Image (cartoon, rainbow, N blue to C red):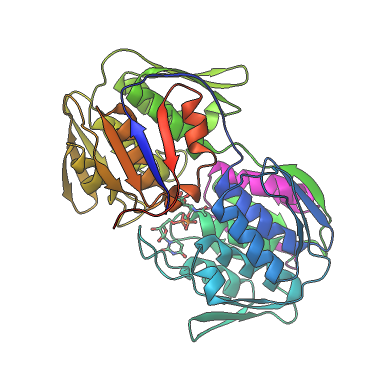
């Protein structure tokens, strides 16, 4: 297993190109199943997760041209040869569950393994399934699989989500494009990835209003065409490097990042003593003065994203004062805290709340990555710490951060990957 070694203490200066958004790309890839024509996706992130989705789609009969390292992928679901997504492919990455809706909408039936829980929480899919039932699907859960059928096709429905779910909104949106009649999604998620998915589907001929707001209306069409679409820039990757710059100090341009997707983070960073500004070509981040403690309460967009909570906690470890965190989206998303404490952080956990008392300095140590965003928080802490930090189990990082060491190194950070086996 690879590990990442960081020698802390260097400020970050320069620019970092932001990749296409992982959490958008995965759903856009699933959209390829809705049409028998070719979907070209540009700015595709080369990540373990997106490659994994490609593997599942290929097993369903989708022809995929996506050379290693390329950021353009062509996906062509001319014929769908299988409507079964097996456990072995779905358990490794939850977003693969999102093939259920497109298969059901186009083929009238699908059998997809339940994704199961993951490190950050139980993450049920009941909202997804209720949406499909409202659209006329018969759903049975048997042997760990969701067996869904709508042999005469899905029909439009009025769906009111009891709480905001990004995945359920996207999944219902995908399926509704080919349902008969009108679908209204209320209390829909407003994350930028939803608007991105809707924009691509619209290019494929879908009729969608209101994506990005709390109410989305879809008029179903008989078929969708192909499209040539660019994935939006990854706001979580951009936010992560913004926090890294705030933690290490310096001045960095996040090339291609969209300020409007990062407003909640910008506001918290400003309060903490770092500046984030929209600029031609991206977003600039600077920090030279001391860091102040600020509180974080994770919320659906446009609130502070849960996917940046771990990174912001790493930042607060060296801020003056006490900061309070409340994680409202996932029930087990503080696994980075014990690892940050190995570097000398002072953190107290109580259920979904954490208090961080800033210390003068962190000191490098060996630490273990536990999930994607937790692992990058350890890299951020390592950049700001004195001495050497070694992050183990970096396969978590490779799920969502493309060329992390290269992007940080070109801004002056001392970060390198050691390949191969780890000492036990
Ligand atoms: C997406 O997960 C992202 N994943 C997550 O990013 C992100 O943290 C999350 O949205 C919130 O922004 C992808 O897009 C692939 P939800 P998703 O449905 O769709 C509960 C990362 O690090 N819920 O909005 O699964 C659920 O358990 C990942 O990149 C139900 O109870 O999130 C959670 O507590 C991690 N029933 C809450 O809702 C359901 O049917 C919000 O989850 C669906 C969700």
The picture places residue 56, in percent across and down from the top left corner, at: 64, 66
Q: Nearer the viewer, residue 270 or 358?
A: 358
Residue 409, above or below 146: above
Ligand 1 occupies quarter: bottom left
Q: Is residue 240 left or right of residue 280?
A: left
Q: Is residue 193 magenta?
A: yes
Q: Is residue 233 visible?
A: yes
Q: Is residue 262 magenta?
A: no
Q: Residue furthest bottom?
A: 142
Q: Residue at x 20, y 54 (%)?
A: 351
How many marks overall? 0
Q: Quadrant of residue 37?
A: bottom right
The picture places residue 149, in percent across and down from the top left corner, at: 66, 81
Q: Nearer the viewer, residue 176 or 375?
A: 375
Q: Is residue 65 left or right of residue 314?
A: right
Image quadrant for the C terminus?
Answer: bottom left
Residue 315, above or below 290: below
The picture places residue 7, in percent across and down from the top left corner, at: 33, 29
Q: Quadrant of residue 65?
A: bottom right
Image quadrant for the N terminus?
Answer: bottom left
The picture places residue 131, in percent across and down from the top left corner, at: 56, 68
Q: Residue at x 35, y 40 (%)?
A: 377
Q: Residue at x 54, y 60 (%)?
A: 95
First to last magenta residue range: 179-208
Residue 352, above or below 180: above
Q: Is residue 209 visible?
A: no
Q: Nearer the viewer, residue 27 or 406?
A: 406
């Amino acid at each position: 297993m690879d590990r990442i070694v960081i020698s802390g203490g260097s400020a970050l200066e320069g620019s970092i190109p932001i990749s296409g958004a992982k959490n958008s790309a995965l759903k856009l890839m699933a959209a390829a199943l809705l049409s028998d024509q070719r979907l070209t996706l540009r700015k595709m992130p080369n990540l373990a997760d997106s490659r994994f989705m490609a593997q599942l789609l290929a097993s369903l009969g989708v022809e995929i041209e996506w050379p290693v390292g390329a950021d353009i992928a062509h996906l062509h679901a001319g014929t769908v040869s299988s409507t079964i997504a097996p456990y072995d492919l779905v358990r490794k990455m939850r977003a693969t569950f999102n093939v259920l809706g497109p298969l059901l909408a186009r083929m009238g039936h699908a059998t997809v393994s339940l994704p199961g829980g993951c490190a950050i929480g139980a993450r049920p899919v009941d909202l997804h399934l209720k949406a499909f039932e409202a659209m006329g699907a018969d759903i049975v859960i048997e042997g760990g699989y969701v067996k869904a059928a709508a042999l005469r096709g899905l029909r439009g429905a009025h769906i009111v989500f009891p709480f905001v779910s990004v995945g359920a909104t996207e999944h219902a949106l995908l399926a509704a494009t080919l349902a008969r009649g009108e679908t209204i999604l209320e209390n829909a998620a407003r994350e930028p990835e939803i608007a991105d998915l809707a924009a691509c589907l619209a290019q494929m001929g879908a009729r969608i209003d209101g994506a990005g707001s709390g109410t989305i209306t879809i008029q179903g069409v008989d078929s969708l065409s192909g499209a040539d679409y660019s994935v939006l820039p990854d706001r979580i990757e951009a936010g992560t490097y913004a926090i890294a710059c705030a933690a290490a100090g310096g001045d960095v341009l996040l090339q291609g990042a969209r300020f409007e997707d990062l407003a909640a983070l910008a506001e918290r960073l400003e309060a903490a003593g770092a500046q984030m500004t929209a600029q031609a070509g991206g977003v600039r981040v600077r920090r030279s003065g001391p860091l102040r403690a600020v509180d974080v309460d994770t919320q659906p967009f446009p609130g502070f994203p849960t996917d940046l909570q771990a990174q912001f906690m790493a930042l607060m470890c060296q801020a003056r004062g006490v900061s309070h965190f409340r994680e409202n989206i996932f029930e087990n998303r503080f696994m980075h805290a014990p690892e940050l404490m190995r570097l000398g952080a002072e953190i107290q956990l109580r259920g979904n709340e954490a208090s961080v008392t800033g210390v003068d300095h962190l000191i490098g140590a060996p630490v273990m990555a536990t999930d994607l965003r937790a692992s990058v928080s350890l890299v951020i802490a390592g950049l700001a710490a004195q001495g050497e930090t070694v992050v183990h189990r970096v396969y978590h990082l490779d799920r969502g951060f493309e060329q992390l060491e290269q992007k940080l190194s070109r801004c002056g950070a001392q970060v390198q990957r050691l390949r191969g086996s780890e000492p036990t």
